[in-house]
Amino acid sequence: MTLRTRTFAPARARFLPLNGAAFSRRLHWIYLAFGLAFLAFVGVMALLEQMGLSRRWIGFLFLVGPIVFYAGIGILARTTDPAEYYVAGRRVPALYNGMATGADWMSAASFIGMAGTLYLSGYGGLAYILGWTGGFVLVALLIAPYLRKFGQYTIPDFLAARYDGNLTRVIGVVAAIACSFLYVVAQIYGVGLITSRITGVAFEVGVFLGLGGILVCSFLGGMRAVTWTQVAQYIVLLVAFLVPVAWLSLKQHATALPQATYGYQLQKVIAAEKTLQADPAEQQVIAIFKARAAELDARLADIPAALAVERRLAARHVADLKADNAPQGDIQAAERVLARVPRDADAARDEWTRARDADLERARPLAGMPPHAQQFAGDPHGDAAARKTFDESRRNFLALVFCLMVGTASLPHVLTRFYTTPSVAEARVSVAWSLFFILLLYVTAPALAVLIKVEVFQSLVGTRFDQLPAWINNWAHVDSSLLQVADVNGDGILQLGEMKIGGDIVVLATPEIAGLPYVISGLVAAGGLAAALSTADGLLLTISNALSHDLWFRIVDPDASATKRVTVSKVLLLMVALAAAYVTAQKPGDILLLVSAAFSIAASAFFPALVLGVFWQRANRWGAAAGMVSGLGLTLYYVLVNQPGVRETFGVTSPIQLWWGIQPIAAGLFGVPVGALVLIVVSLLTPAPSRATLEMVERIRLP
Amino acid sequence: MSELASAPDPTRDARARYWRRTQRLTAALLLVWFVVGFVITWFARDLDFAFFGWPFSFWVAAQGGVIVFVALLAVYARRMARNDRRLAHEGGMGDDGAAGAPRR
């Protein structure tokens, strides 16, 4: 392993000393100082708000302040040394690698999306908590220590060394790029959303602003800069998540530690759910939505006739207004209605079907949310239909947990982090720290979901429309997909069924719901940005390294000098980042749907080859290649055939065929075992691996 | 690998024992992981008794499971550190550089 010889001592010495203990002590001081400086920054902003600084400026400073700081770290940690650029010099202590992994792992989805998912789906959302944390058990027990002992730079490196040659390396590169690119687009999307919402710039501008923040770190200093930035980003995102939740809890039931006590708040939610379901006003709202759906059904039964009627009515309305000399604004509004009448029967069918489905969605009890604490849908003791619903719901929950766990243990950008610790023992400790730091946020998100539900069920529902708190109008104004309220039954009072909520609002609006000053909203935005930026950094590095290190250096030009390799890496990083930003700026809704499948893709491509590579010496290159391709292929096929958004993109028209009712998001449930089985069978049918490979496996099993 | 183990070799034996202990520990911890992650979840509807306000299975999925997982990793890191020391003590580190001496 000649690559481990280190060069360029000056590049190392500039930033940090070599002695491990002294290095750790110095890091403690640096990050303690950073934490205090960040709190001071928040304090100064609070003061400025008191003195009358406008919200726009506060939001702007909260986005720019931290990014300038991250950029500072990036510049201090700039490097051209490969060991520094790819694996941060393998000097990252377990504790700090844990924090960096936490930030690397927790994306915009964890920070903003998860509490919202838990709010909307109750127990069903807990599959994410259980799956995303349980995956780290697999990382620690089956993968991280062995990768660290192997001690190279990327996941395809391991696949190539273990499976004799570049066949598995190339497959690994393709799979790593596929899942990482989908993932990074989602992160940049999150960056653009937060930036544009807080500062008011256009979404596309926000995307490229955020991209600057991402690039300044990973471009200058590679893994080294990304590592030390991610530690800082972890601190920011943790503070930004915990502070508003603690404050809300203090206000609601007088404890700043809701994680320990929200069980009792959950009881209140359960009681409120029963009351709401029996409430006549709620039932009235549901009846109205059902009637609307029935009306649309009637139209769908004879589309041409209904379309003609609608067009005639709209045209007559315009004509009447004109005849009455109505105000110009009213006429224009009526003309817009006329222009929005579907063009032809096909367009009408699409639009009305969508509208009917939306009405049916809202005609369900509790605004479509399942009872918060109810495990799985359906009823195991009910009639046949209820039993089937229960079985499928439980099966899908467990399948999702499985895919998220195995996927977590296969995502290249997370696994690479464990190359950066000083030793195998520290790699093991570091996974434990990672999960601990992730736990701090992951046990808080379900608590937040319950607290917000208490707030909505107890304080909000039943309020008169003219007395709704200000945040409702603010957010309904920002984006109607986040929040919609309308007095459907006209009684002047808000019912739960009259409110349509998008998941993301739960975290974003918590400060306002808790009645906190705007500075805390800025803090939450900074936290969401830190979560998205840190993950995007890790992903971009993974993609560009797969291209530059695994394809260019290992296959095309093995004689390249160290500096040249790093330079090529940086150029590719820039290109990948621009490509990702370009794709994001198109707002590709379909690609975002695919992100949920990224876990299944990573799991079925990497997990069997990585784990059997360590634990089963007989696994050989043909088995691994066949296993990776078949697992990946099966997963992609299942997603392609069954995921509605993907079907539309690729024009798939065959009927949806779910196997055992498993949803496409859990496609890895089939891909992983099939991949493993193919790997075993093909390995046994082909010659055993070489003596050198057997010795390599024995070597990586030792500490 | 019978042909590799033909001659008596204390280093090799110590390494084989180290790997067996590693495998046993890994299997035991994976069993706990499986029970917490999947078995309890499978019976979630039945494990509905009140637990400090939460229904028990809700609590397990929302935080009990996560806490157990962190504990598993802490146990693994400690036990494997002990296993590493035992390997060194039994002379399994060898001088072929296969087992890197734990730094620091």
Image (cartoon, grey):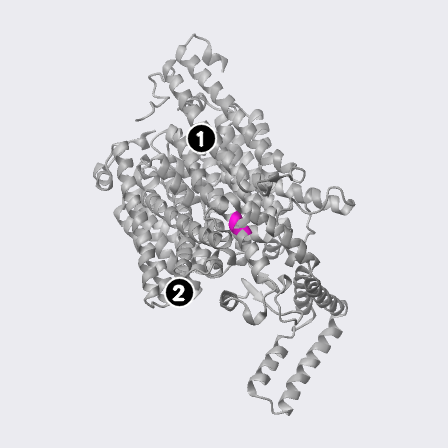
> How far apart in space, not on screen, are marks 2 and 1 (Cα)?
43 Å
Extreme residue in the top direction: B8
- Which of A186/A680 is in front? A186
The residue identified by callout 1 is B74
Q: Which residues are magenta?
A: A446-450
- Which of A522/A542 is in front? A522
Extreme residue in the front direction: A254
Element under disc 2: helix
For disc 1, the chain is B
The reply, left or right, for residue A660 in relation to residue A231 is right
Q: Quadrant of the C terminus of chain A?
A: top left
Q: Is residue A561 visible?
A: no
Residue A160 vertical position relative to residue A449 in the rendered view, above or below: above
- Which of A232/A620 is in front? A232
For disc 2, the chain is A
User: Which one is closest to the eye, mark 2 or mark 1?
Assistant: 1
Instruction: Give the percent coordinates (x, y) of residue B21.
Output: 48, 19
Rendered image quadrant of residue A296:
bottom right
Q: Is residue A314 visible?
A: yes
- Crowd rating for badge 2 (residues with CA inside 10 Å; few <14, some 14–19, many 20+): some
Element under disc 1: helix
The residue identified by callout 2 is A199
Instruction: Write the residue at 31% across / 26% down.
Output: B103
Instruction: Write the residue at 55% across / 47% down.
Output: A597
Does the magenta portion include A125?
Answer: no
Residue A52 vertical position relative to residue B74 in the rendered view, above or below: below
